[in-house]
Image (cartoon, rainbow, N blue to C red):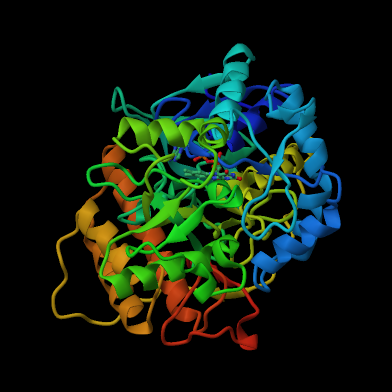
Amino acid sequence: MNQYDYIILGSGIAGLYTALLARGQGSVLILTKAGINDCNTRHAQGGIAAAIGIGDSAELHYQDTIAAGAGLCDIDAVRILVDEAPDRIADLINFGVHFDTVDGEVALTREAAHSVPRILHAGGDATGEHIEVTLSRMARLANIVILEYCLATEIIVDDDVVQGVRALDSRTGAMEEFRSRSVILATGGGGRLFKFTTNPDIATGDGVALAYDAGAEITDMEFFQFHPTALRLPGVTPFLISEAVRGEGGILRNAEGRQFMFDYTPDGDLAPRDIVARGILTEMKKTGSDRVFLDVTHLPPRRVTARFPHIYRFCLVNGLDITKSFIPVAPAAHYTMGGVRTNAWGETNIAGLFAAGETACTGVHGANRLASNSLLEVVVFAKRIMQRTTEGRRPPDAGEGEHFSLSEGKALGSIPALSLSAFESLMWDKVGIVRSGEGLAEAAAILASWQKTIEKPSDRPSYELANLVLVGRLMAEAALIREESRGAHFRSDFPEPSPDWLRHIVFKKAD
Ligand SMILES: Cc1cc2nc3c(=O)[nH]c(=O)nc-3n(C[C@H](O)[C@H](O)[C@H](O)COP(=O)(O)OP(=O)(O)OC[C@H]3O[C@@H](n4cnc5c(N)ncnc54)[C@H](O)[C@@H]3O)c2cc1C
């Protein structure tokens, strides 16, 4: 029987945690498009934020989150995030996640733009892997049906009420229908929109594309976070060098070996990600290099290897001993702040359709995410989804924001042929770290043309490419509409924030 009480799309922390909470409430199906542990979660290094340390408080965590969000955080959602954090950490510990300790106390580190040490970590810099492996092991043991290599291709909606999903079994090519009154999108972010990214192959923004096609509201798509420090070694994927490395004393140096971040901001190496990413880009241009360096050679080698075993081993395998040599780094696409708009209970504007994790936009990140708030956001709001589904259906609240439709785009002489690499390069060059009206208009027009002419998808790669083009379009058009710079969105033609733009851009497919 293909009828379930809960259908959950995705098996990262959002999908697994929600499934583990849901199993006590009814039958649960997880559909996931690759292997169970193929997700962003497994790659998370730094940790998860919660105000549990001496000298910290929910109020301080609130202030840091609001400051990073540059005027666009939903203040009620942020209150929920910081207030409910300690209880959700306790839940993870009860599920069997072992956070690192020092002298019997949970060890806390500091990351950029946090005013105090408040990041819990596991296995040093393998926090995501510990969480993912622990939760997936529990899910396999629980009474949860898990279908791997099953790609959701459509959310079935009737009269603004969710009915279920269609999915492609990519191993057999069969298309199947699954029915439920509660569908939870937990499909993660869209780092694969860009040529250089810290995200794995699965991160193609599917949840946003599925939800948009189903009639859900999509918001804040112009806000995408680029991580300043991804490894830049020839032939090696841009592996993340965690912010925590700078938190522990790592120093950014340009190609000439000079420390430079204090030239850009008094916060130096610990400034928010967008400032550091732009500082690095400027230095790369100035020195004519495609990288800068992160230096930890002044730190005691044992501290580096104990605190960052994962990073140390990855670099060593690729011929670099980071205790002796500088680490070559450059910015890379990292985290999707925008997404499927939800209220404080994870509800979208479609009854029965919920979104959790990176695919959702709960409003806690505003224009820029504070490091290590994303794993926390997942567990806080996934819990609230379960609280809401057990209370019965109610009409979702209307959110604030200005509604837009996708435009046709300006006419262009010639349009390049669509391929994954042409798409990723277009996004990196025109919708990346530094944007301009001209570049965004060109990108929007090319993307609109590609979307019109793209062939009907038939397998996982073609569905993913179609999703990427749609999500890229939503991002390019939102970035074009927002004529200012704020948080992670930087326009060279409008370099300052504008008080007129203290509002959200919302897209909804025309009926
Ligand atoms: C390198 C790296 C380091 C990070 N470090 C940190 C950190 O230290 N702290 C922090 O808070 N955050 C960190 N983040 C961000 C954080 O890891 C993610 O935001 C979080 O893990 C997202 O969880 P999720 O469950 O929403 O998505 P994911 O973990 O990405 O899971 C998405 C799931 O959905 C599945 N899926 C996608 N599309 C479909 C479809 N169409 N049909 C079926 N299944 C589908 C995928 O296969 C996958 O199972 C990091 C991210 C990266 C990439």
x, y percent for residue 401: 64, 73
Instruction: Tell which of 96 and 141 is nearer to you.
Output: 96
Instruction: Tell which of 141 and 450 is nearer to you.
Output: 141
Task: Using the rendered view, name the quadrant where residue 474 is placed.
Answer: bottom left
> Is 4 located above or below residue 265 in the figure?
above
x, y percent for residue 502: 65, 79
> Is 443 located above or below residue 140 in the figure?
below
x, y percent for residue 132: 56, 28
Q: Determine whether, in the image, residue 286 is placed left or right of residue 79.
A: left
Total numbered labels: 0
Q: Hey, which residue is sitting farthest top in the picture? A: 141
User: Which residue shows up at 65% across the image and 22% down it?
Assistant: 27
> Can residue 188 be seen by looking at this rendering?
yes
Q: Determine whether, in the image, residue 373 is placed left or right of residue 316.
A: right
> Is 495 located above or below residue 394 in the figure?
below
Task: Using the rendered view, name the quadrant where residue 253 is placed.
Answer: bottom left
x, y percent for residue 465: 30, 50
User: Which residue shows up at 54% across the image and 32% down it?
Assistant: 302
User: Which residue shows up at 50% across the image and 56% down it?
Assistant: 251
Q: Determine whether, in the image, residue 168 is placed left or right of residue 268.
A: left
Instruction: Tell which of 404 and 274 is nearer to you.
Output: 274
Instruction: Tell which of 156 and 298 is nearer to you.
Output: 298
> Can residue 409 be seen by looking at this rendering?
no
